[in-house]
Amino acid sequence: MPVPASTRRGFLAAGAGLLASGLLNRTRAGERPPVVNPRATDGDDRHEPAWDERLTLTVGTGKSGSGKADLTGEDDRVLQAAVDYVARLGGGTVQISPGTFTLRNAVHLASKVRLLGSGPETILTRHDSETIPLAEDSDWYDQEITLKQPGQFRVGDGIVLQATNPSTGSVEVIKRTLVARSGNRFKLNDGIRKNLWLSASSTCSSLFPLLTSHRTADVVLENLVLDGNREGTANLNGNYGGAIFLEDCNRYTIRGVEARNYNGDGISFQICHDVVVENCHSHDNADLGVHPGSGSQRPRLLNNRLERNTIGIFWCWGVKFGLAEGNRITGNRNYGISIGHNDTDNIMRNNDVADSGKVGVLFRDDARGKDFWANRNLLENNRIHNSGGADGVAIDVQGRTRDIRLIGNDLRETRMPMQRVGIRIAETAGKVELDGNSIDGFATSIADQRPS
């Protein structure tokens, strides 16, 4: 006999009520009920269904062999158009076909967008940079500059404006885009908010990150090559640029990306949280291989190759609760790993650190405040080989670093011992736990300079 619809509705409602009651009964005091069967609710970006499909937009160069694509072009404009279109629909994938894209400005990433290349055949690079002095003063409230000559600058170009601060002597760095032009006079996309005076030797340079973003989240960068044309460009400090440069972003995954030949950092992220850098190859950059920047929380650096940079991994200021594991860090000109100013509660485990120019792993002496050292970090089961020159050090613990654990590391010197040291601990350092480390081939295995 058929069950009346009203009875079925009552049965389902009762079942749902029993389920909800069971879930509620399992919560503790002060806990909210768990979210089950989420729906897309306007303004709620925390819980959403796992949709089976989102938009995928393909980008190609349009050249023979690159395949059919939704959008075609060879520079930043086509890539930016694809990112913006996908972002406008709430997120999705920009699939980049094989080919070389030569950028005149950074590609600005958007939340919930996946930028997916086709592997080593997808290359993002840039033209040579140019630096031209300013011909007129610009005050902090201006939104334009005048160059001595226009050079090769075009509307749409990414630029860096630099000037010497007359009060401090430091260099002011301002990143902007040229949006309009009359002869040598260019309008900027935003006000400069600094003084660019002729007396401050103010200049305009065609410098920019290749991929960048500010205040976005839930982005994936995958399977592409970023070539910074290091030989043809001026240097851009890693606090402002890099082949990848992120600022105030959350939940980025950078996977299978090759960042090479950038006159600056390969991968730099500042005040960014829950960033994953995995299976990437950052090499032959002028400065840092991977730069977890100031204040970044919970970074994970996994199974990367960081080769022939100035420093392989540079933990900046206040980087906490991070993990660097399974990385191969070789041939970096100064340090394999550098950690310092208030970088606490991090784990560096199972990495290969070899052929560093000065020191394998450096705990920096960042003596700027009461307790600014790299405290409460774990260095475990790493292989640190052939560090520095004749006076090289495998692990150098400087300043008042304390409460660190050096456990089960293999420190080896296969060249002549010379004046090389396995572990050096400064006289001002605090508690350092040493356990199970293998130290071989050094003139001095452990140089503990602390008072007895």
Image: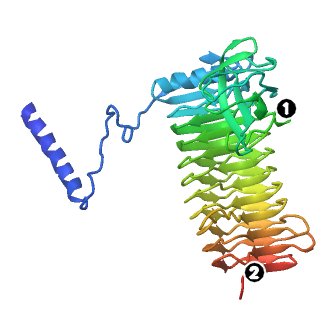
Which residue, given by chain and number where applicable, does mark 2 sit on? 448
> In this view of the protein, which residue sits in the foreground, 83 or 71?
83
What mark, if any, has residue 415 been given in the picture? none
Which quadrant: the N terminus? top left
Q: Is residue 405 left or right of residue 358?
A: left
Crowdedness near tag 2: few (<14), some (14–19) or many (≥20) residues, C-alpha within 10 Å: some
Residue 109 lies, in percent from the top left, at 58, 32
Q: Could you tell me which secondary element the residue under label 1 belongs to? A: helix
Q: Could you tell me which secondary element the residue under label 2 belongs to? A: strand
Q: What colour scheme governs how the chains and residues are painted in the rendered image of this protein?
A: rainbow
Q: Amino acid at mark 1?
A: Gly
Residue 75 lies, in percent from the top left, at 70, 21
Residue under the image location 65 percent in, 77 percent down: 432
Q: Is residue 4 left or right of residue 342?
A: left
Q: Is residue 442 above or below residue 85?
A: below
Which residue, given by chain and number where applicable, does mark 1 sit on? 232
Q: Quadrant of residue 97?
A: top right
Residue under the image location 62 percent in, 24 percent down: 142
Q: Is residue 314 above or below residue 369?
A: above
Query: Can the viewer see residue 38 in this picture?
Result: yes
> In this view of the protein, which residue sits in the foreground, 25 or 76?
76
Q: Quadrant of residue 123?
A: top right
Q: Quadrant of residue 184?
A: top right
Residue under the image location 62 percent in, 73 percent down: 402
Which quadrant: the C terminus? bottom right
Q: Is residue 103 above or below residue 390?
A: above
